[in-house]
Amino acid sequence: MSEESPPPELPLTDDAAFTALEKGRERVTQELAKVVVGQKDVIEQILIALLAGGHCLLTGAPGLAKTLLVKSVAETFALKFQRIQFTPDLMPADITGTEILTETTEGRKLTFVPGPVFTNLLLADETNRTPPKTQAALLEAMQEHQVTAGGVRHVLEEPFFVLATQNPIEMEGTYPLPEAQLDRFLFNVKIDYLSEEDEVNVVTRTTARAPTQIEPVFDAAEALAFQKLTQQVPVAEDLVRFAVQLTAASRPGQSGTPDFINQWLNWGAGTRAAQALIIGAKARVLWQGRSHVTENDIKALAAPVLRHRLLLNYRAEAEGIDADAVVKRLLETVRLS
């Protein structure tokens, strides 16, 4: 059995979607700039993930406006928004929903009460502060866009995005995310501290006046149309091969694997990483108003696509090597043929 969500009304044609994106691209940037200072690359990567129909993991220390940024994106796209604060005592049913016994005219029956995952954009805040069992409750929703409860499949409304935040794993009270869940995220976007000028701007804004309201630029139907449009962006076969070779080179113990990969990694990226590189590159092209994918598009997204899919070993940690350093070496080693 299943409960289907109705599709958005009046789906846009490809031409109408392209025109809407062309007209609204600059407005999105302007609206987000009302409340988010700096973080240009972070914003672009999140928007690319939305166009690609992928989920995004935001990594950074507390107080860097991760939650504000996600909420602002939801408002800009006029998406239904829900937020879950992940804590050590959070249960899977607190995310997906639960069945309760209710009185009806036909007698007592179990009724499913949807959880906060039934939305367009779900903010999973500090997702690595809850145990793996609860973290895994998001897996079916992220991959299949559905929730199964009591043997009944409940389909989520489209579009559906998960933007999850996590604190650095070195912080107290955190649990590492399972590899299977990490692989479901299209990007892992690192949010760093602002420059001094940007931080002065933030402090001045937030202590001088009431928060500025964001005006919606797009809606859910347009977001779905942009996803369809992204899939149609052309990409040459040699670029697809480059993405596959870049991903394959990250796997230790394989024929032709670079020596530094064998020295520093226990596990590399799978095929889903190559898929993420290509669909992400297509979305980047569409967002920037260009016509076709280039090598630079793939290279620009290599770090957010690969950094959470590489499992470093103790030797790498002892030598102070992180995932970004490995990705940089990969880009220097693997060349477009």
Image (cartoon, rainbow, N blue to C red):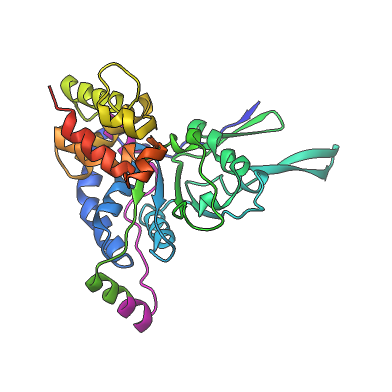
Outermost top residue? 255
Residue 222 inside the magenta-drawn segment:
yes
Residue 295 inside the magenta-drawn segment:
no
Magenta highlight range: 203-231
For the point 67% across and 53% down, the residue is: 89
Foreground residue, 36 or 24? 36
Image side of residue 178 versus residue 12, left or right: right
Question: In which quadrant is the N terminus drawn?
Answer: top right
Q: Position of residue 205 (x, y in %)?
A: 32, 77
Q: Where is residue 128 in the image (x, y as percent from the top left)?
A: 52, 49
Foreground residue, 113 or 279? 279
Residue 5 seen in render: no
Main SS type for the magenta part?
Answer: helix
Residue 178 seen in render: yes
Outermost left residue? 337
Q: Where is residue 268 in the image (x, y as percent from the top left)?
A: 37, 29
Quarter-of-image position of residue 277: top left
Foreground residue, 77 or 41? 41
For the point 18% across and 45% down, the residue is: 288
Image side of residue 81 versus residue 249, left or right: right
Quarter-of-image position of residue 305: top left
Q: Is residue 59 above or below residue 284?
A: below
Q: Is residue 333 above or below residue 97?
A: above
Foreground residue, 26 or 177? 177
For the point 51% across and 42% down, the residue is: 177
Question: In which quadrant is the C terminus drawn?
Answer: top left
Q: Position of residue 271 (x, y in %)?
A: 36, 24
Outermost right residue? 107
Q: Is residue 66 above or below residue 236?
A: below
Image side of residue 100 versus residue 87, left or right: right
